[in-house]
Amino acid sequence: MLARWEKRLSTQGQVTDGWLLLATFSLLVVGWIMVTSASSEIATSLTGNPYYFSIRHGVFVLCSIFFGLVALCIPLERWRFWGPGLLLLGIVLLIAVLLIGHEVNGSKRWIPLGFANIQASEVAKLCLIVYFADYLQRYLPEVRRDWGAFLRPFVVLGVYVALLIFEPDYGAVVVIGGCMMGMLLMSGAPLGRFGLVMIVVVAAGGLLAVAEPYRLERITSFANPWADQYSSGYQLTQALIAFGRGHWLGLGLGNSVQKLFYLPEAHTDFVFAVLAEELGLVGAMGVVCLFALLVFRGLRIGRKAELRGWAFSAYLCYGISLVFGAQAFINIAVSTGMLPTKGLTLPLLSYGGSSLAVSCVMVALLLRVDAEIRAKTRATQTARQAKKQERGER
């Protein structure tokens, strides 16, 4: 029976990974619907048009799909060649956002271009993954053996983290740091080294948490948001109320109460809370399953590449899958009160052009790796059949 289900779920013989496409487009469609629902009231109050954010999000989705199609046409070898340049591009963007960035809620995270704003941390995330995948391909034996090769990536990560802290964008720090640590772990580096590094990371994180009063206040309010539900715990308590209203099947699409100016950032960072209120536990778990499917297919493609000896493709897939998984987990955990509040979007679902564009490019890279694996497999099978025919003729 298990073999039968495995055969049904297999994508062998297909043009591309259909399950990955299904998860991606399902999340894009659900995201567009939920942004439309969650933003209607605030859009009406700000612009008079209830579909203002919905129309903009729709344009973002179409543009992001276009960027993804462009990325899909670029060979992986070209991406690998661009690795060092992309690393520098990420650093330049993170510096530029500190100099000319647009400040929102006390943070400089967006570079204004007139017609749109670019969130530098989203682009830098992709740049670092591509560079680090290239680094692991070039120095994989040394990373597994030598302390120097193991620690060198942390110098690069330190530059990114320092620039992100100045914005500040601690959510991106956690995602990027966790992604790089995960890629190192999957590369086969010794576990003992991770223990020492984790001690340093946890100590540094603890110091950062208590260095500023507002950070400590966030942690204490996260532990008990109801103690100060009209101040530091307001956003989390409103999100929890949304979850409570949702029950099993939700209030129905468009019937959220918390989006009526109770829940701040309802169509961006806390769109999952509105989704849970309107679609209930069933809808929320459906979205979680879609993210799990997306991450699983990405890791599976990476594993196939690793078995073929394609180190760059493998660690590129691992890094992208880890970013999707970590960012989705953190956003959902923040909405449900499992983690302190952070400004982090839900990939492919929250409102925002930069996040959507980078997420679609990442999915395109997964599909590109899968396409090259399938092309190589077909070429190998054709060569084998040609040899068999040649032997038969003889």
Image (cartoon, rainbow, N blue to C red):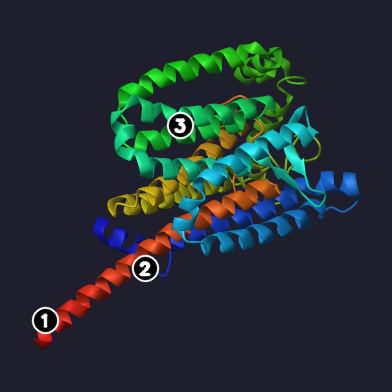
* Quadrant hosting residue 247: top right
Dot placed on the residue nearer the N-terminal end, 2 or 1: 2
Pick the front one: 372 or 236: 372
Q: Label 2: state its secondary structure.
A: helix
Label 2 vs label 1: CA separation? 24 Å
Q: Residue 228 at what x, y percent from top left? A: 73, 16
Q: Is residue 289 above or below residue 215?
A: below
Q: Residue farthest to the bottom?
A: 393
Under mark 1, the amino acid is Arg
The residue labelled by disc 1 is 391
Q: Label 3: state its secondary structure.
A: helix
Q: Is residue 139 left or right of residue 353?
A: left
Label 2 vs label 3: CA separation? 32 Å
Q: Is residue 166 left or right of residue 199?
A: right
Q: Which mark is residue 375?
A: 2
Estimate how packed mark 3 is, as few (under 14), some (14 to 19) or many (20 or more) residues with alpha carbons within 10 Å.
some
The residue labelled by disc 3 is 153
Pick the front one: 223 or 147: 147
Under mark 2, the amino acid is Ala
Q: Label 1: state its secondary structure.
A: helix
Estimate how packed mark 2 is, as few (under 14), some (14 to 19) or many (20 or more) residues with alpha carbons within 10 Å.
few
Can residue 97 be seen here? The reply is yes
Q: Residue 3 at what x, y percent from top left? A: 25, 59
Q: Residue at x 52, y 30 (%)?
A: 157
Q: Residue 241 at what x, y percent from top left? A: 68, 32
Q: Residue at x 61, y 55 (%)?
A: 28
Q: Is residue 45 left or right of residue 373?
A: right
